[in-house]
Amino acid sequence: KQEVTQIPAALSVPEGENLVLNCSFTDSAIYNLQWFRQDPGKGLTSLLLIQSSQREQTSGRLNASLDKSSGRSTLYIAASQPGDSATYLCAAYPGAGSYQLTFGKGTKLSVIP
Amino acid sequence: ETGVTQTPRHLVMGMTNKKSLKCEQHLGHNAMYWYKQSAKKPLELMFVYSLEERVENNSVPSRFSPECPNSSHLFLHLHTLQPEDSALYLCASSQDPGPGETQYFGPGTRLLVL
């Protein structure tokens, strides 16, 4: 059974700092890995999706990497802003034929002005 | 109204009540999902529907009963719930079910069972 772990559970950084959020998964046979953002009282917003054949994806100040062999993914946020404060979730999709998107518990990020 | 909407946003119910959660997507998608997000636990998939047909039931107790009358609407009927069912219930949709599809989430219904 796939398990997804995110460490740390919470992170506080000053504005302008670059930061890295970590995600690890136990079963390397994934189809893709996705990063989401969740704001308090709101649903999830998809940030980046990395296919298993890809090494990284970029969107603006966000860069996500994937290393299937080590079971790890990272989300890099450049020049953090207070508006980046949210909970960041990663989720692994198993092979084709399953709908079970397995989520981590998330990392709660606070960017201090 | 755009995206995925959910009503009500907050719900308090007793263990003997019957209530329903509603989800509507305005994206023309074919797949819809119910998730449960409990405090201190990862988001858990409950049900998946594709073109009004249930394609996955992730070992959810029968006190939760989903209904998908058409591809734009999804309901979760609740009856005789337990306090441990208190959670944020999220609805999502995607163009089609399965991997490779980005899921779009609604804001959720915060449920408290007394």
Image (cartoon, rainbow, N blue to C red):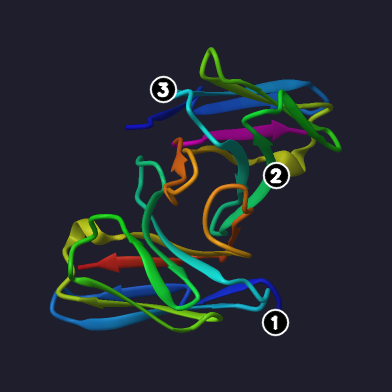
Give the x, y percent position of residue B66: 33, 75
Which amino acid, by three-letter code, is at mark 2?
Leu
Separation of disc 3 and disc 1 at Cα?
40 Å
Residue A106 on the magenta span: yes
Residue A28 on the magenta span: no
Q: Is residue A24 above or below residue A45?
A: above
Which amino acid, by three-letter code, is at mark 1?
Glu
Which amino acid, by three-letter code, is at mark 3?
Thr
Which quadrant would residue B35 be assigned to in this image? bottom left
Q: Which residue is mark 3?
A: A26
Which one is closest to the eye, mark 3 or mark 1? 3
Give the x, y percent position of residue A89: 55, 39
Closer to the camera in the image, B67 or B77: B67
Secondary structure beneath dot 1 equals loop
Residue B1's label in the rendered image is: 1
Residue shown at the point (83%, 26%) measured from the top left: A16
**If the image is split into quadrants, where does the C terminus of chain B sit?**
bottom left
Q: Are marks 3 and 2 on the same chain?
A: yes
Mark 1 and mark 2 in contact? Answer it, CB < 8 Å. Answer: no
Secondary structure beneath dot 2 equals strand
Give the x, y percent position of residue B100: 62, 48
Q: Left of A1 or right of it: where is A89?
A: right
Q: Is residue A35 above or below residue A70?
A: below
What is the magenta segment's predominant secondary structure?
Answer: strand
Residue shown at the point (51%, 19%) measured from the top left: A71
Q: Is residue B69 above or below residue B50?
A: below
Q: Which residue is mark 2?
A: A47
Q: Which residues are magenta?
A: A105-113
Residue B53's label in the rendered image is: none
Q: Given the image, what chain letter belongs to the residue carrying mark 1?
A: B
Q: Left of B6 or right of it: where is B46?
A: left
- Which numbered disc, 3 or 2, marks the residue that appears first in the sequence? 3
